[in-house]
Amino acid sequence: AFDAQGKLKFAVGSQGNGPGQFNEPHGVAVDAQGNIYVADTWNARVVKLDSTGKFVKSWGTGNDIGNGRSAMMTDGTEAGNNAAPLGFYGPRGIAIDSAGRVYVADTGNKRIVVTDSDGKFLYQWGHGGNEPGAFNEPIGVAVDTQGDVYVADTWNGRVQVFGRGESDTVSATPKTSWRVPGWQPSTYDDPFIAVSAEGQVFVSVPGRNQLLYTTTTGEALLRWGGKGNDFASLTLPSGVAVAPDGTVVTVDRGNNRIMR
């Protein structure tokens, strides 16, 4: 964890599957109380830490698939997903809404899983495919102040936005969708998505070494970056987030740095 100026505050974790250990963690989110949630990708789980990095609990299950990795492969169908609500296959993105609900992009099982802040399963939506509401390698997930959920449906080359449905759940049918040029199928660059309180959407496009800024309906407003290591450039940008003051932060993965 770093402060806004990039000064290290604390570090937590080591290789493994025990409390406070990780195996290729990807997504990170923070709730209103400062608790930290980590998509512990190849331990097939979500890890919850307190604001100091102390392990609180974890949830999610997987089976040994070799090379020290765990995953629960459901086959990505609605029936398969319903049979294993907390069986994760390479979860990547994670987001928290204003009510403290946790949204997990269960990437390999092609769905979004929603739990409460203690890991209790609430509901899920999505399955493998390219029709509206289906996913192919969903990676990033973000929630705006209205409760709309944005999913980086990367191998389908699009963002899908889901509004609120009945009983305070998210509708499984998207309210809007748009293409993201540069997101390609069968690539493993892990592009992510972030949404500001003002409704600004930012996505990383690692295949083009760029960040893209759009409206909530996908109107492109700005692209920036380009391969390089100066302060105007990005190389394989992956994670992206927006601070309360509107500052955009990205993991410039190819340059082993964070850019703000």
Image (tube, rainbow, N blue to C red):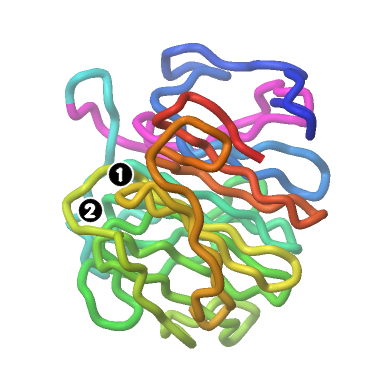
Q: Which residues are magenta?
A: 40-65
Q: Which is nearer the eye, 8 or 77?
A: 8
* Residue 60 image offset from top left, x and y in percent: 44, 40
Report, in whole angstroms, how far the alpha carbon at label 2 lies from the one at label 1: 8 Å
Residue 121, relative to residue 63: is it above or below? below
Secondary structure category for the residue under label 1 = loop
Q: In the figure, is residue 102 to the left or right of 60?
A: right
Q: Quadrant of residue 64?
A: top left
Magenta stretch: includes residue 51: yes
Secondary structure category for the residue under label 2 = loop
Q: Which is nearer the eye, 61 or 234?
A: 234
Q: Residue at x 42, y 45 (%)?
A: 92
- Label 1: few (<14), some (14–19) or many (≥20) C-alpha neighbours in 10 Å: many
- Label 2: few (<14), some (14–19) or many (≥20) C-alpha neighbours in 10 Å: many
Q: Residue at x 50, y 55 (%)?
A: 224
Instruction: From the image, tell me which residue sits under label 2.
Output: 74
Q: Earlier in the sequence, mark 2 or mark 1?
A: 2
Q: Residue at x 30, y 44 (%)?
A: 89
Quadrant containing the C terminus is top right
* Residue 106 image offset from top left, x and y in percent: 38, 52
Q: Quadrant of residue 205?
A: bottom left
Kindly indicate whether the residue at mark 1 contacts the one at mark 2 (C-beta within 8 angstroms).
Answer: yes
